[in-house]
Amino acid sequence: MVARPRRLSHPGRVIASAFAAAITVGTAVLSLPAATAGPGRADLLTALFHATSAVCVTGLVTVDTGTYWSGFGQVVLLLLIQAGGIGIATLATLLALLVSRRLGLRARLVAQAETKALTAADLRRVVGRVLVFVLAAEAVVAVVLALRFGLGYGQSAAAATWSGVFHAVSAFNNAGFGLRADSLVAYVADPVISLTVCAAVVVGGLGFPVVFELAREWRTPRSWSVLTRVTVVCSAALLVLGTVVLLATEARNPGTLGPLAGGTKVLAAFVAATMPRTAGFNNLDVGAYQPETLLLTDALMFIGGGSAGTAGGIKVTTFGVLAYVLWAELRGDPDVEVGRRRLPVAVQRQALAVTLLGLGLVAVGTFVVEALTDLGFDQVLFEVISAFATVGLSTGVTADLPRAAQLVLVVLMFVGRIGPLTLATGLALRQRARRRRLPEERIIVG
C-alpha cells in the first residue's frame, strides 16, 4: 500500500507555506527602488503590509496606491492580487478534492450528489474552468470600466485602460485596491462604474462552485444544491438588509448620503452595502459613518462572502448554517433541514468552530490594538474586523497606527485569509468512525 504524502495530510501547511512564500517575494520586490514613484525605496514594514494586503486580497493600505507606488510597483500589486485570488480558488478546489477522496465511498457519493464535490477525474477540467472564467470575467469588467473612464472622464487611452484593468482585477478578486486616494467616492453618482464594480465583487465573492452551478441551472432553483441555495439566499438577504439599514441610518448624514439626490442615494447605499462582502472599495467617507452604521458594517464584514471564492470573512454559508441551526432549535426539530436535505451534524460543528475562531481572533486583535493606540473602540474594532475578514475598508486610521499595531493587522490579514479555510478542511479530514460511544449526559445550557 502506497503511503500518503505527509504534506497532503496537513493541507494547512501547504496553504500557509504558499501564501507566506508569495508574501515574502512580494515584500522583496516592493522594497526595490523601482517600485516607488519617489526617490528612495519603501521601508520593510510598508512593503510587507502592502504585499500581505495584496496576496490576501484585503485592500488595507498605509500609503496611497496611485501616487506612492510607481507603475512597476502597481503592476507588482496587481500580480500579487491575481495570484492571491486565483490561488485561493485553486487551493479551495484542491482541498475539496482532498476532502472528498478521504471520505468513505458511500459518504463521497452523497457529498457529490448534494454539493457537486470534485473527483480526481474532473479536477483538471474544473481548475481550468476556474482560470478561464476568472480571466474572462476580469476582461469584460476591464473593457466596460476602461471605456467609461476614457469616454466619461476624459482619461487618455493608456490611463483609462490601466485604470480599467487594475480596478477589474481588484474588484473581481475582492481586493479593494484603487488608484485614487478616495477609492470610488468620485464615482458615487456614476451607475456604470458603481454597478460594474459591484457585479464583479458579487460574482467573484459568490464562490466558483456556486457560479458554475447557477450558470447551468439558474432556471431551476429546485435542483440547486444546498451550498448554492444557502449562498444565494443569504447573500441576497444581507445585500437587501444592508441597503435598507444604510438608507435609514445615513440618509440625513451630511458626510455621507445626505447631499445626494433620491436615486443616487439608493445607488450609493446599495454599493456601500455590497463592499463589506470583503471588496474594500468605498464610495462614501467611512470615517463619517454613524456609529450604528459602523456596527452594521462590522457585522457584514465579519460574515463576508461565499465559500471557495475570493471573498473573506467566516463566509455566508457558515452564517447560513448557524441560522438554520437556530431556526431548527427554536422549532424543536431534531434535524436541521435546508430545502429537502438534512445538514450533517459535522457541518454544524464546523460552522460553529469557524465562527468561534473568528470571534476569538477579532477579540484578541481588538484588545491588542486598543492597548497600542489611543483610538476609539469603534475605529479599532472596525479596523481589526476589516483585516481579519480581508475586506480593506477603513475609517482612515490605518496609516496613523503605530508600527506594532500595523504588524498586528498583517498577522490578522494572513490568519484571516487562510484560517477559516484550513480549519474547515482540517475538521473535515479529521472525521473518523469510532467503535464506541460514551454514555450521554445533559448539562444545563443558558
Image (cartoon, rainbow, N blue to C red):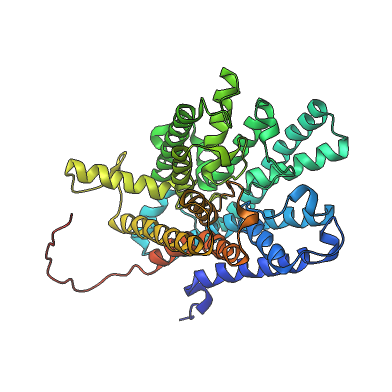
Give the side of residue 437 with respect to residue 338, left or right. left
Indicate the quadrant containing the C terminus: top left, top right, bottom left or bottom right: bottom left
Please provide percent x and percent y for residue 120.
52, 61
Q: Residue at x 64, y 59 (%)?
A: 55
Q: Residue furthest top?
A: 262
Residue 159 placement, left or right of 373 = right
Q: Residue at x 36, y 60 (%)?
A: 353
The residue lying toward the viewer, choosing from 434 and 347, is: 347
In the rendering, at what x and y percent does residue 109 appear?
A: 38, 55
What quarter of the picture does the N terminus occupy? bottom left
Q: Position of residue 273 (x, y in %)?
A: 52, 35
Q: Residue at x 53, y 53 (%)?
A: 383
Q: Nearer the viewer, residue 144 or 298?
A: 298
Query: Where residue 178 sits in the image (x, y, percent)?
Result: 70, 44
Is 413 placed above or below 191 here?
below
Q: Quadrant of residue 257?
A: top right
Q: Residue furthest front?
A: 374
Residue 86 visible in image = no
Is residue 180 among what the camera can see? yes
Give the left or right position of residue 399, taking residue 102 as reference. Answer: right
